[in-house]
Image (cartoon, helix red, strand yellow):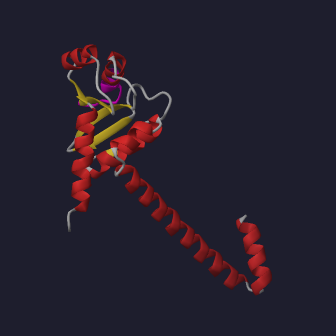
Amino acid sequence: MTIGIGIYLYYLTRSFVLTTVIIGILIVCLFIFFTIRNAKRNERLRLSGINEVDKMEGTVFEQYLRELYLKKGYKVTLTSASGDYGADLILEKDNKKIVVQAKRYSKPVGIKAVQEVHSALTYYKAKEAWVVTNNDFTPAAVKLAHSNNVKLINRQQLIELSLSLKNVSKQPK
């Protein structure tokens, strides 16, 4: 497509230099456009309320958490969708690595998520393991998490985190 545009511009201008300059300007404009669009999309995602979170697909929920934890000062890596070895996100801050299992569920999260993220500790050489959900946890998941030092972040804690970061972004600088 770029070649086609270049040929058409050359046909109109009959100048290789002018065609090159115009194409360069177009590329810079497209880069700026996509950068701004992605920044706005990420900001909208971060400011999503819990009702929007409840409607998200799992991968979008992971991106939502990425934006929240980036805003909180973490370096965030999303793992691959398949073969993630029990972690959806890897957070790093203050020389500490944390593996996170994200569960956007319509029912309470069970022990499987705790088992998965706990197994990711060794694989990713992390210090902490968390499970973050838009729901709550079953009593068995709470018990297993407690015995394995896995931090559970439930719906209410997620709402509080989201609200605290919204308030930070609204404060005057």
- Residue visible at 23% across and 36% down in the picture: 157
Residue 86 in percent (x, y) is at 39, 25
Q: Quadrant of the C terminus?
A: bottom left
Which quadrant of the figure has residue 41? bottom left
Which quadrant of the figure has residue 53? top left
- Residue visible at 35% across and 22% down in the picture: 113
- Residue visible at 30% across and 26% down in the picture: 121
81 w.r.t. 111: above or below: below
- Residue visible at 73% across and 73% down in the picture: 6
Q: Looking at the image, can residue 126 be seen?
A: yes
26 w.r.t. 159: above or below: below
120 is within the stretch colored magenta: yes
**In the rendered picture of this protein, how many numbered marks are placed on residues?**
0
Pick out the residue farthest to the front: 51
Residue 38 in percent (x, y) is at 46, 58
Residue 50 in percent (x, y) is at 34, 41
Q: Quadrant of the N terminus?
A: bottom right
Q: Is residue 55 left or right of residue 124?
A: right
Residue 120 in percent (x, y) is at 34, 25
Identify which residue, 77 or 59, lies in the foreground. 59
Q: Is residue 86 left or right of residue 154?
A: right
Q: Which residues are magenta?
A: 119-127
Q: Looking at the image, can residue 78 be seen?
A: no
Which quadrant of the figure has residue 99? top left
86 is within the stretch colored magenta: no
35 w.r.t. 13: above or below: above
